[in-house]
Image (spheres, rainbow, N blue to C red):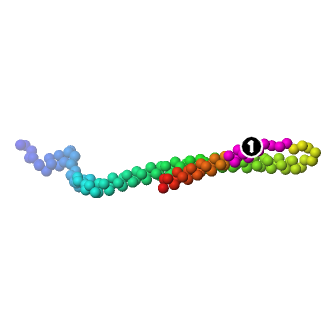
Amino acid sequence: MIFPKKTSDLEDIKKAVEPEEEIVTTSPNIGAPLFVKIEKYRDIVKSVQEIRTFIAGTKQAFTILSEIETIRKDALNILKTTMQRLEKRTVELDNIMLRPRGIPFEEESVEEVGHVEDGLMDLQRQISELKKDLETLR
């Protein structure tokens, strides 16, 4: 050979061209054991079932709470409407009191009061039913 071979130069070139392989060491995966005691498995299944029961009860409670909130909003709307009617009646009574006695007074129907009472009784019945449903969830 004309040129002497330099092994160190060749190795340096190979190292520069070839990517270095990284040696990665991993610890063995610690996963689920191959065998589980039957008692422990039963306990786990029981715990999962209890969690599912709790979740179902919580969902029912949220449903009942949203129904109660709806009923509460309806009751507030009825109360607001009743207050507006009461205010209107008060203004009418005040105007009547200022009239001379010779003008005949027209009687208004009592249907509005009955309607409000019926609505309130219905709301009270719904609330008592919801209370019973809550007690059965406990």
User: Where does the magenta region start and end?
Assistant: 106-118
Taking the image as shown, residue 9 lies to the left or right of residue 115, namely left
Quarter of the picture containing the N terminus is top left
Instruction: Give the main secondary structure, helix, strand or loop, of the magenta stretch.
Output: helix
Question: 68 or 11, which lies in front?
Answer: 68
Q: Is residue 65 visible?
A: no
Residue lying at 21% horizontally and 52% vertically, measured from the top left: 23
User: Can you give x and y, in whole percent of width and height, for residue 44 in the image?
Assistant: 32, 55
Q: Secondary structure at mark 1?
A: helix
Would you identify the image quadrant in which residue 17 lies? top left
The residue indicated by pointer 1 is: 111
Assess disc 1: are there few (<14), some (14-19) or many (≥20) residues with their C-alpha within 10 Å of its C-alpha: few
Given the image, on which type of amino acid does mark 1 rest?
Glu
User: Can you give x and y, in whole percent of width and height, for residue 84 in the image?
Assistant: 74, 47
Q: Is residue 124 visible?
A: yes
**Is 7 colored magenta in this rendering?**
no
Residue lying at 54% horizontally and 52% vertically, measured from the top left: 132
Residue lying at 76% horizontally and 44% vertically, measured from the top left: 110
User: Can you give x and y, in whole percent of width and height, for residue 24 in the image?
Assistant: 22, 52
Taking the image as shown, residue 56 lies to the left or right of residue 126, namely left
Q: Residue furthest left?
A: 1
Residue lying at 77% horizontally and 49% vertically, measured from the top left: 87
Would you identify the image quadrant in which residue 2 lies? top left
